[in-house]
Image (cartoon, rainbow, N blue to C red):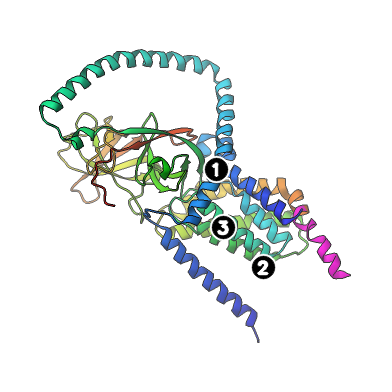
Amino acid sequence: MSMQRIIIVMLLFFLSEGTIFYWLIPGDLVGRIIPHFTLAFVLFAALYRGRHASLLLGLSFGLLQDLAFYGRIIGVHSFSMGLVGYMTGLLLERKRSTLLMALSMIGLSTLVYDTVVYFIYKVFRLTDLTYEYSLYQHIIPSLFLQLLFALALYIPARRWFEGSLKPKTEEEEV
Amino acid sequence: MFNWMRNRRMFVLMIVFILFVAVMGFSIGDRKKLTWPENFALDTSGFFQQWLYRPAGYVSNLIHDLSHMREVYKENEQLRIAAAAYARDSIKYNGMEDKLKKLQDDLHFTERQRQLDNYKYLIAQVIAVSTDPYDETIRINLGSKDGIKPNMAVVTNKGLVGLITRVDPFFSSVMPITKLNVNSADTKLIAATVLGKEEESFGIVDNYDTETGKLSMSKISEHDPLKKGDTVISSGKGNVFPRGMVIGTVDSSQVGDFGLTYTATITPAADFDHLREVFVVQTPDTGDTAP
């Protein structure tokens, strides 16, 4: 699958985050389970494509999220998504990773992402929740959702990101 | 040459970091007008989101209604009673309005005074909701082309939901009052009073406690007649915010931080989950807004 197609799929997931998915979760879990679908794609890109693709996807989709839901501040998601994508890519770029490895890496990176977002809001004094509270309140519950989402998308996403890269590497080998 | 790559990477990271801090600092707080890239992104995403949110809401409500068939009958009955009460009240209201108009004429009210209570309720559809815990934003499908301005009140039939924060040409963002935070850098304050005791009671709703789910109203004088169970409404002093928007009911009242004023906890009246339609309250243009 080419990069354009992946971006279109990501856009669809991005649009569903604030609309369809919002209607799927029951009222008392709103604000506790926060979807990070685009982040999952960014991390898949980091694992199976490369750190630069991941960095670009992270920066642009983070910026899209910042702008589309501009309430208080612009740039938080863009910065943290780009950073987390790049770091994950730096650690595990195109290593042969198993399902368990990929899932734990995505879980860890999501945790780091949420932590970075929390501390940016904290630094700008836009939140006065304690870290422990937000960890319990939404970071851990959304981590479970993220893992489930990554598990469901593991095989197709891997095929999409690796598949479009294959012809290139073969040419290089020749 | 030794670790040149590493140094360059650090350098780029530092520059990007500084750039982002600058953008973040710039984007906090009140901004009257947004730049065109922001407007473009907000409008485009809003355009696509509205085609997903409404059908999803419709389907979800349908399923909910089907599974609560019995309650729907009960609700219908209540609505019929409410409609009967409304018909009775509207006769009374018409009579009172006539009387009020006559009295205003007798007292030579100026045009500005006459228009003071003439609020317009613009109905808006919700098109998307961001569930980001630090930056909950409700997007609605009215924008600056429809006369929406920042800091307008957004209500449902139950009570105050939030304030308009960002406005782009066709859509705008609403900050729910659950994001009021007295310690935050960009907080808003709502002057409030108690229904039925508008002259004697005054306080400022300025904080929402996420852990207890209650609003707090501070700076209440000790001689204030406010008590448990009272309905808190916005007072409209200052002409920015409309008068009489229901905020919630008083839960308890205790001595505030410095012992001089009282602080009351308030249970919010409105529901913030899964909204479909909201009303934006447009205050009459009294002509004294700065250009």
- Locate residue B155, reporting x and y percent: 38, 35
Query: Which residue is nearer to you in this view: B36 or B175?
Result: B36
Quadrant of the rendered image containing residue A163: bottom right
Residue named by callout 2: A90
In the rendered image, the residue lying farthest to the right is A174
Q: Which residue is mark 3?
A: A113
Q: Residue at x 33, y 37 (%)?
A: B282
Q: Is residue A145 magenta?
A: no
Query: Could you tell me if residue B210 is visible in this image?
Result: no
Q: Quadrant of the C terminus of chain A?
A: bottom right
> CB of mark 2 within 8 Å of CB of mark 3?
no
Say what secondary structure mark 3 lies in: helix
Residue flagged by tag 1: what amino acid is it?
A: Phe
Q: Quadrant of residue B205?
A: top left
- Marks 2 and 1 sit apart, C-alpha to C-alpha, by 37 Å
For image coordinates 55% across by 59% down, the residue present is A78
B25 vs B144: above or below: below
